[in-house]
Image: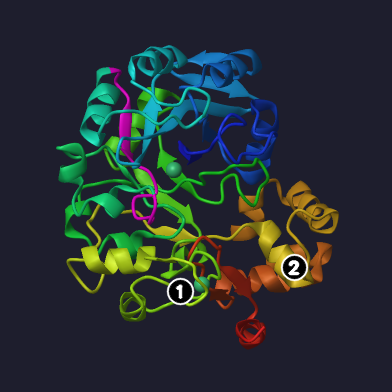
Amino acid sequence: MILNADLHIHSCFSRATSRNMVIEAIAPQAKLKGLHIVGTGDAFHPGWRKIIEESTEYAGDGVYVRDECSFIITAEVEDSRRIHHLIILPSLEAAEEMGERMPSTTTSDGRPRVRMNGAQILEMVHEYDGIAGPAHAFTPWTSMYKSYDTYMDCYGKRPDFLELGLSADTEMADKISELADIPFLTNSDAHSPWPHRLGREFNQLEMDDISFTSLKRSIRKCRIRANYGLDPRLGKYHMTACTRCYRIYSPEEALQMKMKCPCGGRIKKGVDYRIYELSTWDEPHHPPHRPPYVHIMPLAEIIGMKYGKGVTTKFVQGIWEGLVGEFGTEIDVLLSAPIEDIGSIDAGVAVAVEAFREGSLTVIPGGGGKYGEIRFPAETLDAYFR
Ligand SMILES: [Zn+2]
Ligand SMILES: [Zn+2]
């Protein structure tokens, strides 16, 4: 069976996270998005484990079900060098035991900081039959490649997977020769359950059944059928840019300015520049097992762009609900619903979805912590000279 899985989110117990990040809000939103499997995130937090237990039915082999959404136990930790690791575990019990053994400096945060290095973390995850790898592997503040030039220096062995993060895609990462054997994951890292966050990136996996064992096998045996994710230019760390005024710099310029912006802010190296530094080749060399990477955009953002309204406004949400109600899931509206049928509900959005499918929307790249934006081609120049 082919299943859509978003394996990295955060609960209401993580910092800067929506209070709505609870199972009973996530599950129905996942269904509307078109996700079958969602990682719980934050599994080392006792309060979150309690909520998972109370608001799901256990279906066996690591699967916790609510409203037709299957949750798998996942967590993110920050190691002693401020590197984030994504962990996928076989059960709540495994998460509880492992959580108690990890020397942690923070107990209240959903994403704990632990006094361990990457190798120790991977080792311990394997003791519990879980799998782990670097989260958002190329970002400038908290990723493996901000500290190391190779995964061996971080883990001492091959991690089970690598999460690309919102600011990178397969085209970029397959320029790095050491990643040829490593499965790529694309996850949302959502901090709120609304559909422009949850499932904004996800993996399409071939699995024997819905279980932790099948999920693990699917990832380790490279049975990922597709990665769905944002155009990396929409990611907030794609370009090298100032973290205060968000001005974008070329890498050479940034170095010349000694990474200091005239506004007084700090210039942060972008993911595109970091991947350029790490690249073995100028063009991607995809290994035979590598699945396609399909660029998607949140439907609410496409609607918001079309009408010049915020994604969380009632206006945009109303159109979103009408379309998803008609076609079943957001993924269906974005990728497969006939344009004429979308047009019979909202002609303006039909034009925008068609432009998205044809790849004719323009992207104003993000950087320095600010997300990129999408525009119809004609509007792009205006946006640059705002
Ligand atoms: Zn993280
Ligand atoms: Zn600046």
Q: Residue 285 at x, y = what percent? A: 22, 65
Q: Residue 198 at x, y = what percent? A: 60, 44
The residue shown at (16%, 44%) is 153
Decide: marks 2, 1 in contact (CB < 8 A)?
no
- The residue under label 2 is 349
**Prevalent SS, magenta region:** loop
Taking 302 as reference, is 4 left or right?
left
Q: Is mark 2 within 8 Å of ligand 1?
A: no
Q: Which amino acid, mark 2?
A: Val
Q: Which amino acid, mark 1?
A: Cys
Structure colour scheme: rainbow
Mark 2 → mark 1, Cα distance in angstroms = 39 Å
Q: Decide: is 157 above or below 48.
A: below
Q: Is mark 1 within 8 Å of ligand 2?
A: yes
Magenta stretch: residue 133 in it? yes
2 or 241, nearer to the observer? 241
Q: Decide: is 25 above or below 258.
A: above
Rate crowding at label 2 as few (under 14), some (14 to 19) or many (20 or more) other CA atoms within 10 Å: many
Magenta region:
128-141
Taking 204 as reference, is 281 left or right?
left
Res 373 label: none
Q: Residue 100 at x, y = what percent? A: 38, 13
Q: What is the secondary structure assignment of the residue under circle 2?
A: helix
Q: Nearer the viewer, mark 2 or mark 1?
A: 1
Q: What is the secondary structure assignment of the residue under circle 1?
A: loop
- The residue under label 1 is 261
Q: Residue 18 at x, y = what percent? A: 66, 38
The residue shown at (45%, 61%) is 237
Of the residues under marks 2 and 1, which one precedes in the sequence? 1
Taking the image as drawn, is residue 193 in sight?
yes
